[in-house]
Image (cartoon, rainbow, N blue to C red):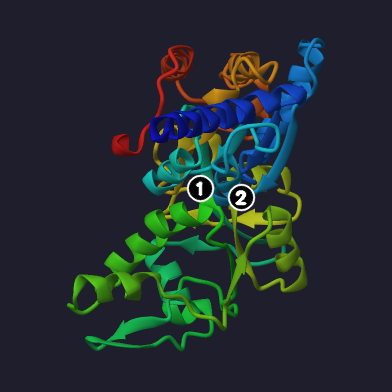
Amino acid sequence: MKTFILAASAAALAIAASAGIASAQSRDTIQIAGSSTVLPFASIVAEEFGNAFPEFNTPVVGSGGSGGGLRQFCEGTGENTIDIANSSRRIRAGEIEACNGNGVNDILEVQIGYDGIVFAVSADREDFALEPVHVFKAIAAEVPVDGEMVANTYTNWNEIDPSLPDQPIAMAIPASNHGTREVFEERVLAAGCEAAELPEMEEEAMEAACTALRQDVVIEIAGDYTETLARLQSNRDTVGVFGLSFYDQNRDTLKVATISGVTPSLETIASGEYPVSRPLYFYVKGEHIGVIPGLEEYVAFFLSDQMAGAGGALEAAGMIPAPAEETAEVQSRFDGREVLTADQL
């Protein structure tokens, strides 16, 4: 009897799991959420996909930030879970483990191209020629003075460096739910912290000193870039952090800063000259392939020359295309169902 109960329980669990996947069959529209940076690109592809493949519904694309999209993606399988998570950073090992714990095991990574993170001000403000150390000294909670860490009292940019504008310090940066925040911390704050030459301290204390931010001049934006733009419009002294593609769409109202003497552009990001750039991704739930109509076709269409290639629709919208051979390798890995695991990261 005990053996029978255990076998019955195992069978029930297997049936429940398969029912969760099969229940997605009652939904025939691809559901996507995640990165606000990838959002405009995915929206273009979704619309064009609907036109090119009338046998499939047009995918529904939402935002929520990279972290928010991946959390939804990892909630499980079935009708009430999304099929694809857009992300402006690579998925983390802990997120894969959370996915696996909820039965999402077939995680397929698709790298689509590149984007740059830019610093911009209202078009009527002075030019900014920034270095990472300027940004760190402007917004760090504590800064080094005569070999000691002291509370940050800088009020204007020109107090940090006379070459910068005589303008009050105010910054709108992405909150932690955005992939842009991670790149901002790695490529700007960490680099600026190192250049600031902090006094010697324990590793844990150093990490805290490099990432602790002022509360008086920093606004963390949990929404998308339109919210950051609204902050610049309400306080015209604000320096905002955006994706290059969003800046390109708002050149009439924004002025971009140089970083380490380099102006962000498609060319300087593609060449690697501009220092604050990152790859863009989306993640496909392999369990839904063959269940939700059009998933394989959507991936192939997204990676096509027409969309993601040089001269394609996404380059026109501001995404930097990956080299053709790199995109071909991404498609090959997807076609071969090469699942991403936590120990690969």
Q: What numbered label is drawn on residue 263?
A: 1
337 and 230: which is toward the camera: 337
Question: Callout 2: helix, strand or loop?
Answer: helix
1 or 2: mark nearer the eye: 2
334 and 183: which is toward the camera: 334
Q: Amino acid at mark 2?
A: Gly
Q: Amino acid at mark 1?
A: Thr
- Among the 4 quarters of the image, the one containing residue 259: bottom left
Q: Is residue 126 above or below residue 338?
A: below
Q: Is residue 143 above or below residue 273?
A: below
Image quadrant containing the N terminus:
top left
Across the whole image, how many numbered discs are drawn on residues?
2
Q: Position of residue 21 (x, y in %)?
A: 61, 27
Q: Position of residue 19 (x, y in %)?
A: 63, 27
- Among the 4 quarters of the image, the one containing residue 297: top right
Check contact, mark 1 vs mark 2: CB within 8 A: no
Q: What numbered label is drawn on residue 307?
A: none
**Residue 123 in view (yes/no):** no
- Between marks 1 and 2, how big is the CA–CA gap? 26 Å
**Residue bearing mark 2:** 65
Sequence-wise, the earlier of marks 1 and 2 is 2
Question: Callout 1: helix, strand or loop?
Answer: loop
Q: Position of residue 217 (x, y in %)?
A: 57, 79
Q: Residue at 53% across / 43% down in the picture? A: 88
Q: Residue at 55% across / 24% down in the picture? A: 287
Q: Is residue 26 left or right of residue 103?
A: right
Q: Is residue 54 left or right of residue 20?
A: right
Image quadrant containing the C terminus:
top left
